[in-house]
Image: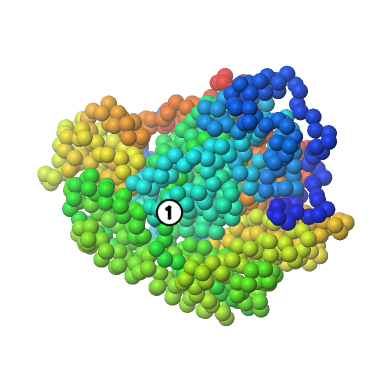
Amino acid sequence: MALDATPDLIDQIKAAGQGNRKLLIQGHSSKRGWLASSRGDDVLDLTSHQGVLQYQPEELVITARAGTPLALIEETLADCGQMLASEPPCLGANTSGAGTLGGAVASGLSGPGRPWLGAIRDAVLGVELINGAGEYLRFGGQVMKNVAGYDVSRLQAGAWGCLGVMSVISLRVQPLAEQEWTLSGAMAADAAIDLCADLGRRNLPINGNCWYQGVLYLRLSGNASGVAAACESLSASGLSRTDETPDLWRQLKNHEHLFFHRGAAPKDDSNAEPSVGSRAKLWRVITPPAAPLPSFLNAPETDLLTLWNGGLRWLYHDQDDAVRAYSHAVGGWCWALGEVMPMEAAQRRVIEHLMAAFDSSGVFANPLGLAPKAVSLSGGVS
Amino acid sequence: MQVMFRQPWLRHNGGMNSPREPNIDSGHWAPEQSAPHQAVLQRLRALLPAASVITDTSGLRPYETDGLTAIREMPWVVVLPETEAQVAEVVRCCAEHGVPVIARGAGTGLSGGARPHARGVVLGLSKMSAIEKIDTENRVAVVQPGVRNLAISQAAQQYGLYYAPDPSSQIACSIGGNVAENAGGVHCLKYGLTVNNVFGARVVLADGSIVELGGTLYDNPGPDLLALLCGSEGMLGIVTQVTVALLPTPETKAVLLAGFAKVVDAGSAVAQIIGAGIIPAGMEMMDKLAVQAAEAFAKAGYPLDAEAILIIELDGSAAELGALTDKVTGLLKANGAYQIDEAHDASTQARLWKGRKSAFPAVGRLSPDYLCMDGTIPRKALPSVLTEIDTISQAFGLAVANVFHAADGNLHPLVLFDANEPGQTDKAMAMGAKILEACVAAGGTITGEHGVGVEKLDTMCVQFTSAELEQFFRLKTAMDPQGLLNPGKGIPTLTRCGELGGMHVHNGRLPFPELERF
């Protein structure tokens, strides 16, 4: 199903601008629970704007319309032995789907391989963008090296649509590895993080790790001889090959892992019970990978899951102040899922000025809690 | 039109300046005397040590140009701050008085991005050259903007780590300049560009305020401002601290040299290697003229009868490299490579690389002058673009040697000419513009890694519509309302594009017919 809804999208944006109405850009709404709800007068539905426009495996680039289901992109790539380098999550498949390409880029979320394979912002090579005035603009392209003009394409990663609606996106893709093995070993979380830091300085074909419930899981990915040799050398670190968790990395990528669903539905499995009441929020804490672990967790064994060498720490906790103070103290930041994403004041100011540059009348509703602010010639906010 | 580029060591005796760019002869040089300028100068002198505020002609002279030596302009003042607070104060003071600020790293840029402004302050960051931290636990280095690219890897070497992006100027170029130009190198396909290897930056904005972007972090909230900053040529902010990724030094390397009787075979070998799921650390192609020049210059052992050669670098653990090398060698043979040399020791590897690395000066010996283009094309378009370059070359009567980062599609055609022959310079520039147009038509871009600066302002008109250029200007104004950070670079005005008649037309449609044309 390849459909170009560009003319409709432009018409709706222009009409909204004239009618002073706010548009909520919407794909599959698969991330609805992630950010505080944002209000729009009307929905700008991207789901019919889909289709893979260009894909040649040896070019390592895929170009598709923003409403293309992420699952379809993944399938298309897998058929040719490739994958999206950043492993963007397909979240909670609902009736409409498990996420679109546009949503994946707009949210800027990356999967378990981020430190090794890059974030989705690294994979973005070009976007075709419709700004708040309904102008259709092309930035970047399909080539890796491109320094012509400002990098408006990568700027869209994490913008949640606040700078316009992406119509077509080109992403760099990655070959699937010949061999992928999962290793595991029992150890405490701090030992796991120390070990990950140590392994990161060695030539090992690692492209994922996760600590949960007293076990470090390591993903080895590469050619057969390299993976086998690495596996052998890692036995000295207490890690050995496991076949018990064949689906672990996909579950982590798509947030289907048990850890993320403990409050959602009652489970018989006592291990999955949250240690604190349902008041405990799920926090996404980004820290320097080797930063010390939080000491305030009620039950670290079940309330903590780390990824990215320790640089992403998912945790359940009911004391907001404790999580925020900790994140700040180690030089990171935190975000309680379902709430507004925090942002430094200086950065917020720049982004609000940029919003005025792309969407001066504020046609696009955005879930970041930001509003366009024009700059005056003296540099201040008018 | 393409303004001439020339490596500093190839400076032509006759000297040459672009006819359309202002040039200030030292004899007529008079410093700016306006009241705002005098007020700024007073503040600068109070802020910085006397030796760090340069106003005399001989002191200013080294700053009049960057790696694009054909374009020169004497700056009004050069300041050399040593701290972020001083940088911020210089910018704030200039903003208050409406004086332009041109940030400058090592001045090795190839597109004139650091060309001074006659009424502006050059803010040289060379004194901010401290490596603040090598963090081995998190594998990052926190460095000041004036730190040389190679110095980071040298400092990290004792921990078995290095900084991956390696632009050809890495001995001299600074990390601040790398961020400003989003510098590349020969290992980009596997290890990425500057933007992919920078985790954080502290930035002085146009009003002198400071914003911290990212950190030792794999993820940040909101639109990716750090990515926007990379490649923005000092027009959106001035970097005062950079946090870069460090990687473990590869355990082993293999370098392969393959000779082909047909360019098209070399191209299909490249496609098949990547199609087979192999991401080489580096993969370079040179055509016959470039090979012959490089071989005469460097004695690298390249096959002189080859129409094209590939130089492929593979790296990784010893365990994986054997199988990888065999696979690549097999694909090279299958695609008609008639000579394959494998190098596993450092000295042979260095010899094979030497020819490629000296390709520019080697070509310089073939011809009094040359013009280096920096287009990028989809890899699949290589045979057709090379054919087109050949056609263009014959039509203009000037030879072209092609050096190609085959892994990432970045093509550097070198147009050979003699500036002393009347009309040849214009001819070469016109021909260069045609080549870049061919790159854009093939789905590529006018600049892969050298930046727009002042050199490619005109060809920007070929790649972008007026609506896109206007969006760039609105973005710029949002971050620099007075337009004082590196004015006149990066993005051409609509007037300029209109006058050139080079307005971008997509699919035969004139874009945005409602807009005014100049």
Amino acid residing under circle 1 = Gln
Q: Residues within 10 Å of mark 1 (few under 14, many from 20)?
A: some
Position of residue B347 measured from the top left corner of the image (x, y, whole percent): 51, 69
Q: Residue at x 82, y 56 (%)?
A: B419
- Residue under pointer 1: B157
Query: Foreground residue, A53 or A229?
Result: A229
Query: Foreground residue, A191 or A277?
Result: A191
Q: What secondary structure is found at the residue carrying circle 1?
A: helix
Query: Foreground residue, B126 or A28?
Result: B126
Q: Residue at x 38, y 44 (%)?
A: B135
Position of residue B223 measured from the top left corner of the image (x, y, whole percent): 47, 37
Q: Residue at x 69, y 39 (%)?
A: B63
- Looking at the image, residue B336 sits to the left or right of residue B23; the answer is left
User: Does B436 sit above or below residue B203?
Assistant: below
Q: Residue furthest bottom?
A: B338
- Looking at the image, residue B250 sits to the left or right of residue B127; the answer is left
Q: Residue at x 56, y 66 (%)?
A: B353
Image quadrant where one finds the C terminus of chain B = top right
Query: Foreground residue, B261 or B239?
Result: B239
Q: Residue furthest right?
A: B422
Position of residue B321 measured from the top left corner of the image (x, y, whole percent): 40, 69
Q: Is residue A198 visible?
A: yes
